[in-house]
């Protein structure tokens, strides 16, 4: 899902950066509301997600397929803490490993740090207590699927991409819907494990969306 440099034209890059810059500033300000005991989880989770994301493979359409971890980050740390986790991961990948471009960092953050995190968090929070494990699965599946669709739209409307929406949307949406089953299962298993081993990490004291 990491879109490299040269695949998004200046208009798409500019639009995504115009959204992500104020969003990032707001997220950093809201992160102050994260309970102190959870703040130490941010670098730990970022390291885990970083390692998991290094396992990826290319697919048609100019991008790649891999575990994302946005929904799990949102479930554990709320929308703003989850964003910080993904922001750290994507920034290091971009600047140090060139996994995702600098010009496309705004788009990659929008897809993986905003859409995936918010969708996973919202589905989890909306579910009743007895269905939280299922919600973790569904949130992760839906989050990565919608993030993949967003990436497909960005690639499809870009003048620099050799594929149109008729190719990028089904490829990105379809592949990530399939991968979402695996990501959902991993997220649900991780949630179930933490529910027994570290239930305090799943408490209600998460940063609010407002």
Image (cartoon, grey):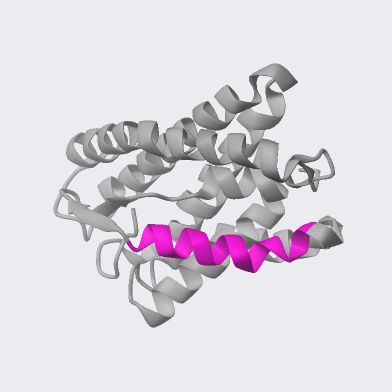
Residue 149: x %, y % from top left: 36, 38
Against 4, residue 135 (above or below) is above
Q: Is residue 46 magenta?
A: yes
In this orientation, does residue 14 appear?
no
- The residue shown at (68%, 36%) is 195
Quadrant assignment, res 58: bottom left
In this orientation, does residue 163 appear?
yes
Against 71, residue 129 (above or below) is above
Residue 60: x %, y % from top left: 15, 48
* Left or right of residue 78: residue 87: left
Q: Is residue 39 magenta?
A: yes
Number of numbered labels in the structure image: 0
Q: Quadrant of the C terminus?
A: top right
Out of 163 and 126, give the one closest to the viewer: 126
Over which residues does the magenta segment extend?
38-54
Out of 129 and 116, give the one closest to the viewer: 129
- The residue shown at (65%, 25%) is 132
Quadrant assignment, res 51: bottom left
Residue 30: x %, y % from top left: 79, 58
Main SS of the magenta part reads helix
Out of 41 and 7, give the one closest to the viewer: 41
Against 135, residue 176 (above or below) is below
* Left or right of residue 201: residue 155: left
Residue 180: x %, y % from top left: 38, 35
- The residue shown at (44%, 33%) is 185
């Amino acid at each position: 899902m990491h879109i490299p440099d040269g695949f998004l034209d200046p208009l798409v890059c500019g639009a995504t950066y115009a959204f992500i810059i104020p969003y990032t500033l707001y997220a950093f300000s809201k992160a102050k509301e994260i309970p102190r005991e959870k703040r130490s989880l941010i670098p730990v989770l970022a390291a885990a997600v970083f390692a998991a994301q290094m396992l990826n493979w290319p697919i048609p359409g100019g991008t790649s397929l891999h575990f994302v971890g946005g929904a799990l980050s949102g479930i554990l740390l709320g929308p703003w803490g989850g964003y910080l986790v993904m922001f750290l991961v994507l920034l290091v990948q971009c600047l140090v490993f060139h996994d995702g471009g600098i010009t496309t960092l705004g788009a990659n953050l929008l897809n993986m740090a905003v859409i995936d995190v918010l969708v996973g968090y919202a589905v989890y929070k909306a579910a009743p207590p007895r269905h939280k494990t299922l919600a973790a699965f569904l949130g992760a599946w839906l989050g990565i699927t919608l993030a993949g669709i967003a990436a497909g739209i960005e690639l499809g409307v870009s003048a620099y991409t050799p594929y149109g929406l008729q190719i990028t949307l089904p490829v990105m949406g379809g592949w990530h819907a399939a991968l979402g089953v695996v990501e959902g299962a991993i997220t649900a298993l991780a949630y179930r494990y933490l529910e027994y081993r570290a239930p305090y990490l799943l408490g209600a004291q998460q940063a609010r969306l407002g």
